[in-house]
Image (cartoon, rainbow, N blue to C red):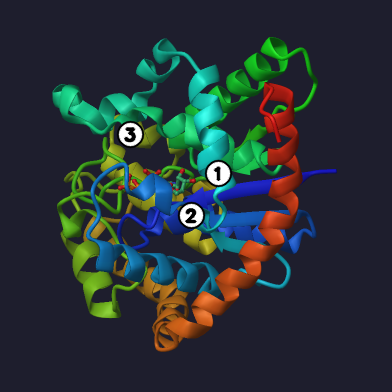
Amino acid sequence: TPRVFSGIQPSGGLTLGNYLGAIKRFVDMQDQGIETVYCMVDLHAITVWQDPEALRRQTRELAAGYIASGLDPEKSILFNQSQISAHAELGWIFNCVARMGWMQRMTQWKDKAGKNSQNASLGLFAYPSLMAADILLYHATHVPVGEDQKQHVELTRDIAAKFNHDYGVDFFPMPEPVIEGAATRVMSLRDGSKKMSKSDPSDASRINMTDDADAIAQKIRKAKTDPEALPSEVDGLEGRPEARNLVNIYAALSGQSVDQVLAEVGGQQFSAFKPKLSDLAVEKLSPISGEMARLMQAPDEIDAILRKGADRARAIAQPIMDRTLEIVGMVR
Ligand code: AQP
């Protein structure tokens, strides 16, 4: 039976990229009646130092973001990664299965560690191995992620295959990345070649899910563009990453295809298109940010939801962890 797993790092505020590339799709899958397990991956977040108070707040805010976006904690399992110690335990076992060379090839590692990789944390290097543990601990079959995480899901398959091979078992399934839709990769508003990211030092580069209408309008007004009018066909977006990004965002928020959007706005200048995009973004995002703010008034309720979710998650994870330890040869 299919089981969906995915997670988001509480490493900052939630962005429009996380919403369109991840949460919105998580909710769609939940509403299709598939078993869905979603997580705040706080152990991943600390691969880069996080202020402890900020981490706690961001974790609750992320939980509020999931719920405000339509995730129903009765239908989906929603919890915080560090509540289930088996994530770290299985992550260690996979550190012993995965190879250094596999990790070195990961583009996220290269991007995040940069030139100063000797100074990056060991955890940042091993990130994909912990992510494999997150997924395989639930024997998940489908992993909805943005384009940027596809490589890590492929590595998860390599880890599962090597584990099964090394121990002569057919235990871990091969999960599939699920990537779809126009805005699976939302780009920075300041640079169309960089993805929109919660940890980008420039706040103007992203739309935060907690931004109010004025902030959204201002960021879109200042978003980088080129001087040409919008094209009427997709080919006309070639070599225009900033234009493509804004059109993609419009398409994703309005539930239209890029072709449909261009048929409507082709020929317009950005000065006409940007206000339309802001209005649409405000219309779609303000109910979510309003609900997030309401939920954040009651952090105890959020914590109680997560504890219940963790109990349900543990019921799936623990037998799989126990069996793994047995396969590897640990005396129990
Ligand atoms: N710009 C994006 N466009 C589409 N999808 C995106 N995702 C992230 N950025 C975009 C998707 O959101 C999910 C959660 O990502 P994450 O928090 O685990 O880590 P990330 O991919 O590294 O996201 P950020 O926002 O860039 O975080 P930081 O800045 O901390 O690294 C994933 O499914 C991802 O594909």
The quarter of the image holding the N terminus is top right
User: How many discs mark residues in the rendered view?
Assistant: 3
Residue 113, by quadrant, is top left
> What amino acid does circle 1 point to?
His
Disc 1 Cβ-to-ligand 1 distance below 8 Å: no
Residue at the spot of label 3: 124
Residue 86, by quadrant, is top right
313 horizontally vs 263: left or right? right
Residue 269, by quadrant, is bottom left
> What amino acid does circle 3 point to?
Leu
Give above or below for 111 relative to 139. Answer: above
58 horizontally vs 315: left or right? left
105 and 280: which is toward the camera: 105
Residue at the spot of label 1: 87
Quick check: can you spot residue 179? no
Work out how far the residue at label 1 is from the one at label 2, CA to CA, in angstroms.
Answer: 7 Å
Secondary structure beneath dot 2 equals helix
x, y percent for residue 300: 47, 84
Give above or below for 286 relative to 204. Answer: below
Quick check: can you spot residue 23? yes
**Disc 3 crowd, CA 10 A, few/some/many (<14, 14-19, 20+):** many
> What amino acid does circle 2 point to?
Ser
User: Of circles 1 and 3, which is in front?
Assistant: 1
Residue at the spot of label 2: 82
Secondary structure beneath dot 3 equals helix
x, y percent for residue 25: 59, 54
Give above or below for 262 relative to 60. Answer: above
User: Of circles 3 and 2, which is in front?
Assistant: 2
